[in-house]
Image (cartoon, grey):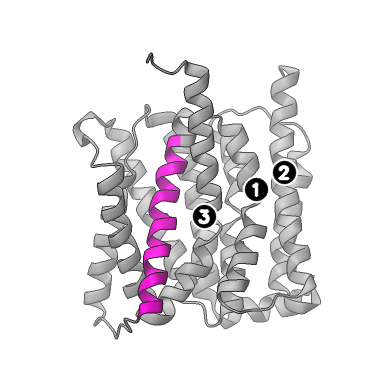
Amino acid sequence: MGRPKPGMRSRNATLVGLVAVLLWSAIVGLIRSVSESFGATGGAALIYTVASVFLLLTVGFPRVREFPRRYLIWGSLLFVAYELCLALSIGYAHTGRQAIEVGMVNYLWPSLTIVCAILFNKQKSGLLIIPGFILSMLGICWVLGGDQGLDPAGMLANVQDNPLSYGLALAGALIWAAYCTVTARIANGKNGVTLFFGMVSLVLWIKYFATGGGDMDFTYRSAAHLVMAAGAMGFGYAAWNVGILHGNVTVLAGASYFIPVFSAALAAFLLNTPLSLGFWQGAAMVCGGSILCWVATRRRERSGG
């Protein structure tokens, strides 16, 4: 049989990227579940270690010498920093509800990615980018306001209860937006996800032992959640990298905007945490704002401006 045509390869890569959206939607609930059994740092270290093994067996280890030096340096630095922020922000959350809220803050990255693309990659955009970004930020405020919806006092109290988790989640959103923007320019089609995951697990194990370790509660249930979390994390990023490097980035970006709602629903189920109407309103606003940002760039592209 002949090689697939370029258009078919692009469609296949896009479908692979869409699988990442489904897998990522389960990450928040699974990371939190694992951290409850193995600790924030220990649980994260186990997840990334097992995920690294999965990636070695499926994707394989990349030929690092063929990587552009800038991608190797900046890609690894940003990827490791983001994963530390993501895993530890969820692990350090005081409750299941707070873990879901922290995950929602992290999902500001689609809007931030578009803003970064406009600022640094000269992405064309229409005026809808402004209300879109504002709506996303307003949605996060709505989520953090608790059951009352948009409640500045409640939001402030929420953040003050655990500034580390919320701060790490916001930093992670900014870092991942930078990662997507930078790698699109300098990766040259290379995929370093296996290497990057190994680096994340190494840093986490260093932190784990440097801070005195901690108890780990191995049970059939915790082990199952660990394997599921590692699978969702590792295969999710492998699929996403294939998608953004070889597929239709616009389609993938549009699909990723619905991750907050899917993620919250799955996390609420896994963590047995009911969520209020105000939370779902805020989550819908985050999605809606991201979609407006996406539409702003698409309309500008079609107009040729």
Could you tell me which residue is drawn at 24 percent across and 38 percent down?
62
Q: Nearer the viewer, residue 159 or 8?
A: 8
Q: Which mark is residue 257?
A: 1
| Residue 207 sits in quarter | bottom left
Residue where numbered disc 2 is placed: 291
Could you tell me which residue is drawn at 42 percent across and 63 percent down?
228
| Quarter placement of the C terminus | top right
Circles 1 and 2: CB atoms closer than 8 Å = yes
Residue 205 appears at what percent x and percent y? 25, 68
Q: Nearer the viewer, residue 297 or 37?
A: 37
In space, the residues marked 2 and 3 are separated at their CA atoms by: 18 Å
Residue 256 appears at what percent x and percent y? 60, 46
Chain part drawn in magenta: 220-242
| Residue 208 sits in quarter | bottom left
2 or 3: tag closer to the N-terminus? 3
Q: Is residue 239 left or right of residue 271?
A: left
1 or 2: tag closer to the N-terminus? 1
